């Protein structure tokens, strides 16, 4: 009885601590300087940007419908039997400028989708209201985050290894990215707490961070998932130190090990947004990794209070994502319904589980003893440590890539590009098993060939990063590495 009482009262305490109202009502302290001088437009000027049937519009710089090339439009979708024809009335709309947040029916469908997966879970906080906004993908979502929240010399906390495209943004923005150590469940709470508590001594010359950037499922590059307990711990630390959480979650639907529900669909982990009681989470979603990357479409989901400023940033940058893409997604989603969407998600997960298995078989066949890795339970990537190499950049650039095989480089995923990395990232979603058989054999041969290589430090059996080729050539910028990826395809 006593024990029960104690546990219950502890729970009560922690709940009441969590329930303490910390709802963010004013975001101005998080904003970048850029937002202290917002665009000056009057409401009547805004009206002159859009086409409307409510008034004679001579203000907008819009083309005539007589120029539009598309006369009829039918979609034939993979895994859908019927052909879906776009109504003639809508052809004009999709070829003309339109307005954010996006096409109304699509937006309504996506709002409901977000509610289903990320609707506030634990308890309602009065005044909490969120909304969505379309982008051209999470990369644009990230660009918006940097513009709205971060100035030169501001600090952003990230995972120890993180998405290269985020570092590609942080460097030119002049933002300090501070990587927090991770384990198999994500950022380690004690490490996060330690860095924040000791900020003034550890990072004396840097501003206190405004936000934590996380990739909670199928983390890029490590493939790990934050479980709910870990998310709560991280969330509470962010509450304590009043940090925003930028939840960049392209692999949310690509979770492999979860139990199934009665419909045979995997029950997905709760997101940071779902446990967010304070409106401190800004969530980025994308269709790139489970539908199509070329359609360029993503979603920002967060407090309604932030929407005007995000809306302005996206509008100033691109006006809105393509009407053609919006019409295509609208047609597909309305035809699928939520059940069809879930079936697609399951289909994608099953394909990826098979591809992960194929990749692992090839790795075990060709790289036994040469690499160390853990099997990822989500996402698209295997994160391999090359056992006898201390700089994957020089090794891949000088030895492997000349043999027409390329892997992602550890350094592209590190906040500090001056620290050499023994890691490579292997995308298992793309190539076929036979390609992997060839490529991993080449990698294995290259690793074995190092035994006779002059660059090996015999004691440590590692390749020296300070060989002549690497010290005379600067590291390839990330963008060039991405282009290499394209060229060998
Ligand atoms: C963590 C992360 N964020 C953002 C992106 C960019 O995705 P999108 O195609 O939606 O711009 C990627 C793509 O690899 C990613 O892995």
Image: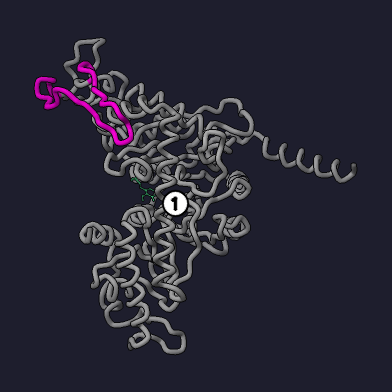
**Front-most of residues 438 and 331:** 438
Residue 333, position as x, y percentages in the image = 36, 28
Badge count: 1
Which residue occupies the extreme right position in the image? 1
Vertical relation: 480 (above or below) 19: below
**Front-most of residues 367 and 393:** 367
**Front-most of residues 358 and 455:** 358
Secondary-structure class at tag 1: helix
Residue under label 1: 353
Viewed as shown, does residue 375 lie left or right of 340? right
What's the magenta region?
63-90
Which residue occupies the extreme left position in the image? 67
**Front-most of residues 43 and 320:** 320
Vertical relation: 224 (above or below) 25: below
- Residue at 30% across / 62% down in the picture? 435
Residue 179, position as x, y percentages in the image = 49, 59
């Amino acid at each position: 009885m006593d024990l029960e009482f104690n546990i219950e009262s502890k729970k009560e305490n922690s709940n009441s601590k969590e329930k303490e109202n910390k709802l963010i009502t004013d975001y101005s302290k998080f904003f970048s300087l850029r937002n202290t001088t917002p665009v000056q437009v009057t409401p009547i000027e805004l009206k002159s940007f859009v086409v409307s049937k409510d008034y004679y519009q001579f203000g907008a710089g819009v083309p005539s419908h007589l120029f539009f090339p598309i006369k009829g439009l039918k979609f034939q979708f993979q895994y859908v039997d019927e052909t879906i024809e776009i109504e003639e009335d809508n052809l004009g709309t999709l070829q003309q400028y339109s307005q954010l947040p996006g096409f109304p029916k699509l937006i309504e469908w996506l709002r409901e989708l977000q509610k289903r997966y990320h609707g506030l879970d634990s308890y309602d906080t009065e005044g909490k209201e969120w909304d969505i906004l379309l982008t051209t993908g999470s990369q644009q979502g990230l660009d918006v985050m940097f513009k709205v929240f971060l100035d030169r010399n501001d600090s952003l906390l990230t995972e120890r290894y993180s998405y290269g495209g985020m570092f590609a943004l942080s460097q030119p923005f002049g933002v300090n990215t501070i990587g927090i150590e991770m384990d198999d469940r994500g950022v380690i709470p004690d490490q996060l707490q330690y860095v924040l508590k000791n900020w003034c001594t550890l990072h004396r010359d840097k501003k206190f961070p405004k936000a934590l950037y996380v990739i909670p499922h199928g983390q890029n590059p490590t493939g790990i998932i934050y479980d709910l307990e870990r998310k709560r711990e991280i969330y509470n630390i962010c509450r304590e130190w009043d940090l925003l959480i930028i939840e960049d979650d392209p692999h949310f639907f690509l979770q492999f090990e979860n139990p199934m529900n009665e419909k045979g669909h995997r029950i997905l982990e709760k997101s940071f947004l779902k446990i967010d009681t304070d409106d401190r989470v800004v969530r980025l979603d994308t269709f790139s990794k489970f539908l199509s990357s070329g359609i360029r479409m993503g979603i920002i989901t967060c407090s309604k209070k932030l929407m005007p400023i995000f809306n302005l940033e996206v509008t100033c940058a691109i006006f809105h994502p393509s009407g053609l893409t919006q019409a295509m997604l609208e047609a597909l989603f309305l035809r699928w319904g939520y059940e069809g969407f879930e079936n697609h998600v399951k289909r994608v997960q099953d394909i990826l589980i098979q591809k992960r298995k194929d990749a692992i078989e090839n790795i075990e066949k060709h790289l036994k003893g040469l690499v160390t890795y853990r099997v990822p339970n989500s996402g698209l990537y295997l994160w391999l440590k090359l056992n006898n190499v201390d700089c994957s950049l020089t090794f891949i650039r000088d030895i492997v890539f000349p043999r027409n095989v390329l892997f992602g480089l550890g350094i592209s995923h590190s906040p500090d590009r001056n620290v050499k990395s023994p890691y490579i990232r292997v995308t298992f979603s793309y190539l076929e098993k036979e390609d992997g058989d060839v490529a991993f054999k080449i990698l294995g041969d290259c690793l074995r060939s190092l035994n006779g290589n002059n660059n090996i430090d015999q004691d440590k059996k590692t390749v020296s990063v300070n060989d002549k080729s690497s010290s005379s050539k600067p590291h390839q910028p990330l963008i060039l590495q991405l282009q290499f990826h394209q060229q060998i395809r």
